[in-house]
Image (spheres, rainbow, N blue to C red):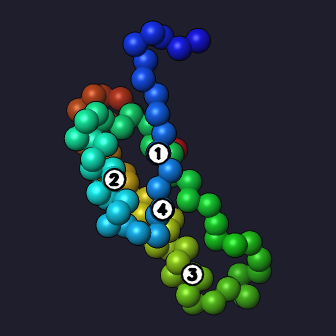
């Protein structure tokens, strides 16, 4: 059951465009803190490591490491200030 004053929402963002990602998250944070951050960008495409190209490695690094580091950096101060937060 959800409390009457509870407000939950979600936002799906394109992690390929980090400038847009940062702008949209900052817009949300200007209105309210983000208490739970789920870092799930999907991918990279499955398959043998030996078959992956350098471009595929770079894309996976950008989508999983750099984009998630940006999200954590943007959200963590609000979580610390509230003494509550979850990063999944």
Left or right? Give the position of 37 relative to 29: right
Tell me which numbered mark, 4 or 2, is placed earlier along the sequence: 4
Figure check: 85 above or below 46: above
Within 10 Å of the Cα at label 3, are there few (<14), some (14-19), or many (20+) other Cα atoms? few
Tell me whether the residue at label 1 lies in contact with that at label 2, contact meaning CB atoms closer than 8 angstroms: yes
Q: Kindly identify which residue carries mark 2.
A: 24
Rounded to the nearest angstrom, the CA distance separating label 3 from label 1 is 26 Å
- Expressed as whole percent of the image width and height from the top left, the position of residue 31 reads 25, 36
Tell me whether the residue at label 4 lies in contact with that at label 3, contact meaning CB atoms closer than 8 angstroms: no
Tell me whether the residue at label 3 lies in contact with that at label 1, contact meaning CB atoms closer than 8 angstroms: no
Figure check: 52 above or below 15: below
Q: Kindly identify which residue carries mark 4.
A: 14
Comparing marks 2 and 3, which lies closer to the viewer?
2
Tell me which numbered mark, 1 or 2, is placed earlier along the sequence: 1
Residue 46: image quadrant is bottom right
Residue 44: image quadrant is bottom right
Q: Kindly identify which residue carries mark 3.
A: 57
């Amino acid at each position: 059951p959800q409390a009457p004053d509870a407000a939950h929402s979600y936002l799906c963002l394109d992690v390929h465009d980090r400038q847009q990602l940062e702008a949209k998250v900052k817009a949300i944070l200007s209105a309210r803190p983000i208490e739970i951050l789920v870092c799930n960008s999907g991918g990279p495409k499955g398959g043998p490591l030996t078959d992956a190209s350098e471009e595929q490695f770079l894309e996976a690094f950008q989508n999983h490491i750099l984009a998630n580091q940006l999200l954590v950096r943007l959200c963590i101060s609000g979580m610390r200030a509230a003494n509550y937060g979850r990063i999944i």
